[in-house]
Image (cartoon, rainbow, N blue to C red):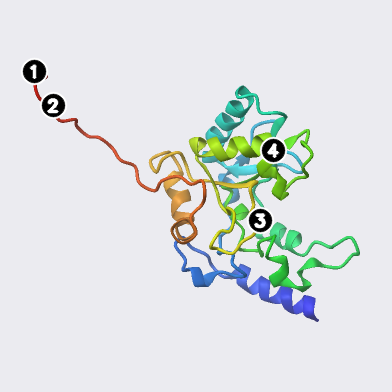
Amino acid sequence: MLLHSALAALTLVAAAPASAGQAADARLYGHLPYPDADPAMLVAAPEGFDLRQPCLLRREVIPDLTALIAAAHAAGVAGTVQGVSCYRSAAHQRAVFCATDPDGNARCTEPAKRAMSVAPPGHSEHSTGYAIDFGTRPSPGCDDVEYCFDRTPLGQWLLKHATEYGFELSFPWRNPQGVTWEPWHWRWVGRSATEPGARAARLLFATARADFPAKPRLPNLVVRVVSQPPVPGSN
């Protein structure tokens, strides 16, 4: 009965419409609501990036992801850059949220506890098509989606350079959103607000970026120098 009640509540919440800029009180166990991406807007990640399953992303993410992979390789980062998880529909997220433990028990019988490490359906950034869980192969002594990822060569490189390719760390250490620290989880918002597709991504993550800033993060504003005043005595 407890499992049925938990699933019923999650189904109702996941079915509610989510829109950009929702208030923080719309959160469920700390997680903000997000809509499913339009399947027509999703494309396959660069060849070889998939790890456990096919990696689908919003098409505007692909150029920056391709550049990021190439840059990490050129910098000598050990192993290959892989995508542990990319787009996940609400239905897929529900299956992940209620996956069974080694004893065969559904993990979502205690939804608040489960939500500490997995977003409830309808409340995952992965459903937007803009989020990626990164990993490497071979794995340097650290399993996928574990805290030790921040100490791997790729984890360290992403902390220094991922923002150069339009990605920011959604859930940093001790984040005010109250979500578990996830050094492997990065969302794409574009290198600048004027990059194709970046405006839509930044609008979708507006509440998260305003109330629960990523770290490292990208600036919201783009400053343009329209004209440069003449230097005194240069004529």
Label 1 sits on what residue type? Answer: Asn
User: Mark 2: which secondary structure?
Assistant: loop
| Residue 123, horizontal then vertical, whole percent | 60, 63
Residue density around tag 1, few if under 14, some if 14–19, many if 20 or more, within 10 Å:
few
Q: Do callouts 2 and 1 mark residues in contact (Cβ within 8 Å)?
A: yes
Q: Nearer the viewer, mark 3 or mark 4?
A: 4
Query: Does 2 sit left or right of 87 as displayed?
Result: right
Q: Residues within 10 Å of mark 3 (few under 14, many from 20)?
A: many
Disc 3 to disc 4, C-alpha distance = 29 Å
Measured from the top left, where is residue 219 in percent x and y?
A: 41, 46
Q: Amino acid at mark 2?
A: Pro
Q: Secondary structure at mark 1?
A: loop
**Residue 218 visible to the viewer:** yes
- Mark 4 is on which residue type? Thr
Question: First in sequence: mark 2 or mark 1?
Answer: 2
Numbered label attached to residue 230 = 2
Q: Which one is nearer the viewer's eye here, 189 or 42?
A: 189
Q: Determine which of the numbered discs, if any, sits on residue 89 in the image.
A: 3
